[in-house]
Amino acid sequence: MQSIDEATVLITGATDGLGRRVARDIATRGATVVLHGRSRERAEAAAREIRGETDNQNVSYLLADLSSLDEVHDLAEEFMARYGRLDVLVNNAGVGSGGRGTGRELSRDGYELRFAVNYLSHFLLTNLLLGRLKESVPSRIVNVSSIGQAPVDFENVMLEAGYDGNRAYGQSKLAQIMFTFSLAERLKGTGVTANALHPASLMDTKMVYESYGYTLSTVQEGADATVRLAASPDLEGVTGRFYDGEREARANEQAYDPQARERLWDLSEDLCGGLLTPDFSQDG
Ligand SMILES: NC(=O)c1ccc[n+]([C@@H]2O[C@H](COP(=O)([O-])OP(=O)(O)OC[C@H]3O[C@@H](n4cnc5c(N)ncnc54)[C@H](OP(=O)(O)O)[C@@H]3O)[C@@H](O)[C@H]2O)c1
């Protein structure tokens, strides 16, 4: 990757929790940091605070509700219009499993909410930004997943039957890892790498307080592991891996099934409809 102080880094869900801390830590190193948020007020406040905390004035923000694929599409367009390079894309935004009694929720497009926000929005965003990533090689995609994983049941992806918040969250997180492995394969030789990680267990963030009511680790532990994948020179060229913190780990078996991965990719393209222009036909 370009040395970090010359890099441009886009982080989704950077208004709170892990994403906000990762944004601050990367801004501290002098990168141009683009925060993504869904609320103008929160995004503006996060950008202002991070500029103040780091003395880095190259911290800006873009808005999109990731439960709308149209807004994801507009986010990608706006990014392309405003920024000439993309060295690191950190796909971090997410919705947790929800507390006790949280029922099935739908995205603005009518898809199961966790699958839509945690996985599908990032599938679309990443594909739409691949051209910029390829122009900026060597570049990196970091998908913030989890060790909480559940296999994708292709007969019931939208969890119309037997909804459970943990299953919904776990399915979306495994889908991210399957996507990571597919991307790494498709991007072999291009100079764009793709890795996924479980940042840390039950960090002290809003998502964890809402879902569990207690925490086991700090957001800084997860941020350190995430920033390492985004920026460490030791990981140059490393691709297609899943990490638990800083240790390479094995994901749920379904992630290693090429047919399941292909099926998920095809389904995701279908669900994105006309918004997706796959970029894999382009050279380098
Ligand atoms: N916390 C943990 O222990 C843990 C463990 C493993 C993996 N993870 C993963 O780490 C990532 C960050 O989690 P966190 O704990 O930092 O959660 P968090 O504090 O709740 O932050 C989530 C971020 O995602 C954004 N977001 C949620 N729904 C969105 C939507 N529809 N459109 C746009 N943005 C949306 C939130 O925006 P607002 O500020 O507007 O709400 C916020 O910026 C997630 O992918 C999560 O699955 C977390």
Image (cartoon, rainbow, N blue to C red):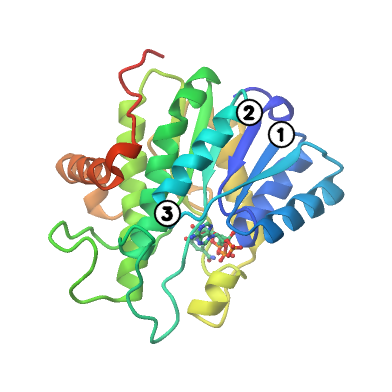
Q: Amino acid at mark 3?
A: Ser
Say if 168 sits above or below 162 in the image: above
User: Is residue 140 in view from this perspective?
Assistant: yes
- How many numbered badges does the structure rendering display? 3
Residue 83's tag is 2
10 Å neighbourhood of mark 2: few (<14), some, or many (≥20)?
few
Q: Nearer the viewer, residue 112 or 222?
A: 112
Residue 58, quarter of the rendered image = top right
Q: Are marks 1 and 3 in contact (CB under 8 Å)?
A: no
SS class of the residue under badge 2?
loop
Which numbered disc flags the more N-terminal residue, 1 or 3? Answer: 1
- Residue at figure coordinates x 41%, y 72% from the top left: 97
Q: Nearer the viewer, residue 225 or 263?
A: 263
Residue 32's tag is 1
Q: Are marks 2 and 3 in contact (CB under 8 Å)?
A: no
Which numbered disc flags the more N-terminal residue, 2 or 3? Answer: 3
Residue 68's tag is 3
Mark 1 within 8 Å of ligand 1, using the beta carbon: no
Q: Nearer the viewer, residue 193 or 57?
A: 57
Ligand 1 image-quadrant field: bottom right
Residue 43, given in percent of the width and then of the height, sits at 68, 55
Measured in 3D between alpha carbons, the distance from the residue under mark 2 to the one under mark 3, in whole angstroms, is 22 Å
Q: Is residue 259 left or right of residue 67?
A: left
10 Å neighbourhood of mark 1: few (<14), some, or many (≥20)?
many
Q: Is residue 161 left or right of residue 89?
A: left
Q: Are marks 2 and 1 in contact (CB under 8 Å)?
A: yes
10 Å neighbourhood of mark 3: few (<14), some, or many (≥20)?
some
Q: Amino acid at mark 2?
A: Tyr
- Residue at figure coordinates x 22%, y 51% from the top left: 254
Q: Residue furthest left?
A: 155
- Residue at figure coordinates x 66%, y 28% from the top left: 7
Residue 8, quarter of the rendered image = top right
